[in-house]
Image (cartoon, rainbow, N blue to C red):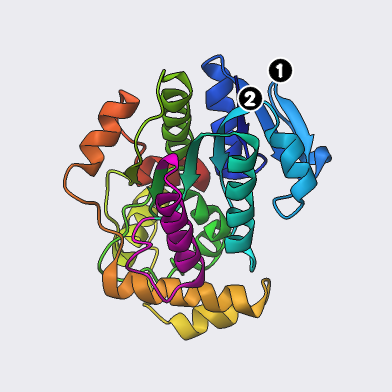
Amino acid sequence: MTILVTGATGNVGSNVVQQLVNRGADVRALVRDISKAKFPEGVDVVQGDLLDVDSLRTAMSGVSTLFLLNGVVADEFTQAVIALNVARETGVERIVYLSVIHSDVYVNVPHFAGKFGVERMIEAMGMSATILRPAYYMDNELTIRDVVTSYGIYPMPIGDKGLAMIDARDVGEVAAIELLRREQSAELLPLNYINLVGPDTLTGAGAAAIWSDVLGRTIAFPGNDTAGFERNLRQFMPSWMAYDMRQMAERFQTDGMIPEAGDVDQLTALLGRPLRSYRDYVAQIAG
């Protein structure tokens, strides 16, 4: 049977597709823009949108398992609810949903609250699903690399509690493993949750120190000014999204993204290798 991947051209989705192909799965990718569909040979590409019910029905026809990834957009919750309803309508019984860690804690952060609502819908509908809860992505550091290297500061106001940052490649691989576990099971499997975390819990000062070591010069951490963070973000994203990101940063500072006991060991066992480290990721992108 076929596994459908939504958000397939993005950083996580493309990793999921590649990992599934590597494991011999029959993969279909739902994309809005066909010109961005650069997938391995054999991937079935369907053009559509999570708000276009007809295209969703077409994409889910003959699908047994769904990887549901919704971008951070104003109608994220609506997209997810429609996709899950169409999945049930078309007979898709096995689901892996990409949520976020501490969705039940960051309750005032719009995109966290939306994902928490989707989790509750999956539970209430009795769906056979894995809910993946990733922490902050290391890959977000690509957006600040030039600031770090040009101005000598680590500008993300991530606070002093610590974030267990994870590499999107590890997220994609765990997702593929879970999709195939559900796809290949003779019976529908019960609902389960997996926290996706990295091996290190990093503060703002700690992240700056790693950049300093990798670059061989001092990178400063200027502090946790979330108002300034929002002002900077508004230069290149909608005001609602910049505000959303500010609320998230403020919860970084009050709550952090701390793994639960056993999270790292579970992921290491699942992958059969160590998780990718923040230091290695910075070394990869710094050059």
**Residue at (72% x, 43% y) in the render:** 56
Question: For the residue carrying disc 2, how many other residues have a C-alpha within 10 Å: few (<14), some (14-19), or many (20+)?
Answer: many
Location of residue 191 in the rendering, given as x and y in whole percent from the top left corner: 35, 41
> In the rendered structure, are the residues bearing label 2 and label 1 in contact, judged by CB atoms less than 8 Å apart?
yes
Q: Residue furthest bottom?
A: 227
Numbered circle sitting on residue 285:
none
The residue labelled by disc 1 is 42
Q: Give the range drawn in magenta.
A: 101-130
Position of the N terminus, as image quadrant, is top right
| Residue 150 appears in the rendering | yes
Mark 2–mark 1 Cα distance, whole angstroms, equals 8 Å
The residue labelled by disc 2 is 27
**Which amino acid is tagged 2?**
Val
Location of residue 175 in the rendering, given as x and y in whole percent from the top left corner: 46, 35
**Residue at (72% x, 55% y) in the render:** 51
Please determine whether, in this image, residue 41 is positioned above or below residue 257. above
Q: Residue furthest top?
A: 24
The number of callouts visible is 2
**Residue at (45% x, 42% y) in the render:** 127
